[in-house]
Image (spheres, rainbow, N blue to C red):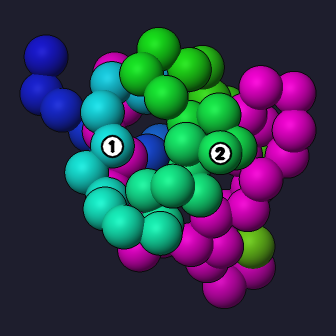
Amino acid sequence: MIPQTLNTIPEGGKVRVSRLLSSGSMRRRLLDIGLIEGTDVECLQRSPAGDPVAYLIRGAVIALRAEDASQILVE
């Protein structure tokens, strides 16, 4: 399977996190909201401008910028 990044998932798409590529404080923030390997994520809605995007992560709706979502590998 070809690795995809979270920012390429269409609205309504459901994926599972396979790896985080980010580092530093952003990596820490993603880990703090529960984005670890094996976490299920659903793309709920894109903003009218396309950025940020709302994702359902462990029961919470989290908005991520495309720049940050591109650092999350999913399957």
Residue numbers of the magenta segment? 48-75
The answer to whether marks 1 and 2 mark residues whose Cβ atoms lie closer than 8 Å is no
The residue closer to the viewer here, 6 or 30, is 30
Q: Which residue is pictured at 65% across the width and 45% down the height?
A: 32
The mark found on residue 28 in the picture is none
Q: Is residue 17 above or below residue 10?
A: above
* 10 Å crowding of disc 1: few (<14), some (14-19), many (20+): many
Expressed as whole percent of the image width and height from the top left, the position of residue 28 reads: 51, 55
Expressed as whole percent of the image width and height from the top left, the position of residue 59 reads: 87, 27
Q: Is residue 72 covered in magenta?
A: yes
The residue closer to the viewer here, 2 or 18, is 18
Q: Is residue 27 above or below residue 25?
A: above
- What amino acid type should be assigned to the residue bearing mark 1? Leu
Q: Earlier in the sequence, mark 1 or mark 2?
A: 1
Determine which residue is flagged by label 1: 20
- What amino acid type should be assigned to the residue bearing mark 2? Asp
Q: Is residue 74 covered in magenta?
A: yes
Expressed as whole percent of the image width and height from the top left, the position of residue 74 reads: 36, 31
On the rendered image, what quadrant is the C terminus found in? top left
Looking at the rendering, which quadrant does residue 29 occupy?
bottom right
